[in-house]
Image (cartoon, grey):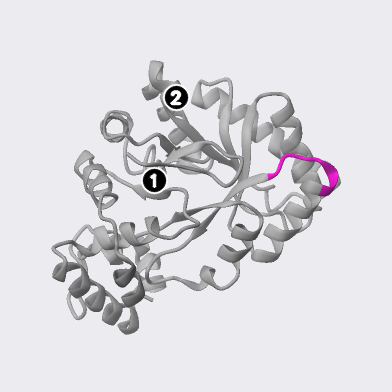
Amino acid sequence: MEKRRLGTDGPELSVIGLGCNNFGMKLELEDSRAVLHAALDAGITHLDTAEMYGGGRSEEIIGECLGKRRDDVVIATKFLPRPKDEDYAPGALARRIREGCEGSLQRLRTDRIDVFYQHYPDAEALEDEALEALDELVRAGKVLHVASSNVSAEQVERAEDIAVRRSLSRFTGTQIEWNLLNRAVEAEIVPAARRNGLGVIPYFPLASGLLTGKYRKGETFPEGSRFDTLSFLADKVVNDENFDEVERLTAFAEERDHTILELAIAWLIAQEDVSSVITGATRPEQVHANVAAARWRLTEQDLTELK
């Protein structure tokens, strides 16, 4: 599988990443193991998790299932923000970051985290505090690279300025929601990442499932499907405008003997700023479908038509 560097200074990642948020939530140990091993066998080397996924169970499952294959992968995890009911005082965020790191290392059964994300920015703490704490972890060898998630273009710029000015570890990438139905990030966040040498890691590439071809305008959601069981997700993305776009994209893909799922992933991979696309799976065959999508190389004419 193709690999790309995360930004200018980060690790090499497989262009398809495995989102491990289902581990410990939808999937228990053996089903998670089947998905993880299918990903490894298919050439996926980028595993994305977080301490909040399954209350830490996702990390535990990864640690238990990797075994001797730990050095074959890049593990990216994310620390939780400060609890909402905890008043901020200087040092509180730094303490949360250190605690998050230690907990993740133990659950993952590893001596280092390859990419450590700030899952959400702290609205009260100075950005310097997060960057200082993360830099300490890098200098200690517990974290190899640091990254941001769910930030604005302005926050990308400020973090880079602070890190360079104070000689702290720079963010190597940023994780954002980006797909063919949600392209708002192209206006400011993606250009900010490009200017500052950050790789972009899109999540929700299938728009919570709307870009799988499973859902059709005017039809009842399939029983047991994500939109059938998680109405808040449906409320977020299901509307006539999106369904009309899904129909257009489906026709575009089928004219080229591909599925809309393959188009959704291939289109993101074709974006010059994308280092790896986070794809979830609950079954090995879904892993195989995601990997197959990465083999489709869209032409310049294709990309022009999709603008």
Counting from the top left corner in percent of width and height, residue 72 is at: 41, 25
Specify whether 300 is left or right of 163. Answer: left
Instruction: Check disc 2 and give the amino acid type.
Output: Gly
Residue at left offset 41%, top offset 49%: 278
Query: Could you tell me which quadrant the C terminus lies in?
Result: bottom left
The prevailing secondary structure element of the residues shown in magenta is: loop
Q: Which residue is mark 1?
A: 15
Question: Which quadrant of the structure image shows residue 215?
Answer: bottom left
Q: Secondary structure at mark 2?
A: helix
Residue at left offset 75%, top offset 44%: 131
From the viewer's side, name the closer residue of 17 and 164: 164
Specify whether 251 is left or right of 4. Answer: left
Residue at left offset 63%, top offset 40%: 146
Whether 41 is drawn above or below 85: the answer is above
CA separation in Å, label 2 and label 1: 22 Å
Q: Which residue is mark 2?
A: 63
Part of the protein shown in magenta: 165-170
Which of the numbered marks, if any, corresponds to residue 43? none
